[in-house]
Image (cartoon, rainbow, N blue to C red):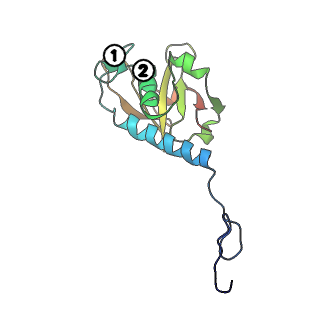
């Protein structure tokens, strides 16, 4: 049939193969982006030890649990140390928004957790009397206590 154009999936009109981001990677990056945006929406929420929702207040692991439960299909629950047993360890240089960052804040491993938001910053629920806020991984009190990073997205 003369003049009829036939489209072949995955092939551009030039005959070159079309490259796309694999669906799982795209979905993971979208979910991670949503995690960051949702977590940033909790800034200024009051702290409460053992808190698992913004109305009552949040602690560090409660904030992570709440955000991931609201935004993803991942059910991350338990203490910061419990969360550190899940996911995949990554180098600090490989951090991507939505990854978790762990700290030694009480002279015990994995005693605090936050959500990496990019640009060497993270969001977390820091302590009694405090509020959810962002901090630097490069300088300050938490920077000196950084322990490990983990990703929960593939």
Residues marked 2 and 1 touching at CB (< 8 Å): yes
Residue 4 appears in the picture as rendered: yes
- List the residue tagged with mark 2: 62
Residue 120 appears in the picture as rendered: no
Q: Is residue 104 above or below residue 43?
A: above
Callout 2 crowding tier (Cα within 10 Å): few <14, some 14–19, many ≥20: many
Kindly indicate the quadrant of the structure image that contains residue 90.
Answer: top right
> In front: mark 2 or mark 1?
2
Residue at left offset 59%, top offset 37%: 153
Drawn side of residue 29 relative to residue 70, left or right: right
Q: Quadrant of the C terminus?
A: top right
Of label 2 and label 1, which has the lower sequence position?
1
Tell me where residue 8 appears, x and y as whole percent: 68, 68
Residue closer to the observer: 87 or 108: 87
Residue closer to the observer: 138 or 8: 8
Identify the disc placed on residue 106. Answer: none
Residue at left offset 71%, top offset 71%: 16
Residue lying furthest bottom in this view? 2
Q: In this view, does 108 lie above or below 125?
A: above
Q: Quadrant of the N terminus?
A: bottom right
- List the residue tagged with mark 1: 48
**Number of numbered discs:** 2
Tell me where residue 72 appears, x and y as whole percent: 48, 33
Tell me where residue 57 appears, x and y as whole percent: 31, 20
Drawn side of residue 41 relative to residue 138, left or right: left
Kindly indicate the quadrant of the structure image that contains residue 39.
Answer: top left
Query: Disc 2 and disc 1: Cα gap in Å?
Result: 9 Å
Residue closer to the observer: 9 or 97: 9
Residue at left offset 41%, top offset 31%: 70
Residue at left offset 46%, top offset 21%: 61
Kind of element beneath mark 2: helix
């Amino acid at each position: 049939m003369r003049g009829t154009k036939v489209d072949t999936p995955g092939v551009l009109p030039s005959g070159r193969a079309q490259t796309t981001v694999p669906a799982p990677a795209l979905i993971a990056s979208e979910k991670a982006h949503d995690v960051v945006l949702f977590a940033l929406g909790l800034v200024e929420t009051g702290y409460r030890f053992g808190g698992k929702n913004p109305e009552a207040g949040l602690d560090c692991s409660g904030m992570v649990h709440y955000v991931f439960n609201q935004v993803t299909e991942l059910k991350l629950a338990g203490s910061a140390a419990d969360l550190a047993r899940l996911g995949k360890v990554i180098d600090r240089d490989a951090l991507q928004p939505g990854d978790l960052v762990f700290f030694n804040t009480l002279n015990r491993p994995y005693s605090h957790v936050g959500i990496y938001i990019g640009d060497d910053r993270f969001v977390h629920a820091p302590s009694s009397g405090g509020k959810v806020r962002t901090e630097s991984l490069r300088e300050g009190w938490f920077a000196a206590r950084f322990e490990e990073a983990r990703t929960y997205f593939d």
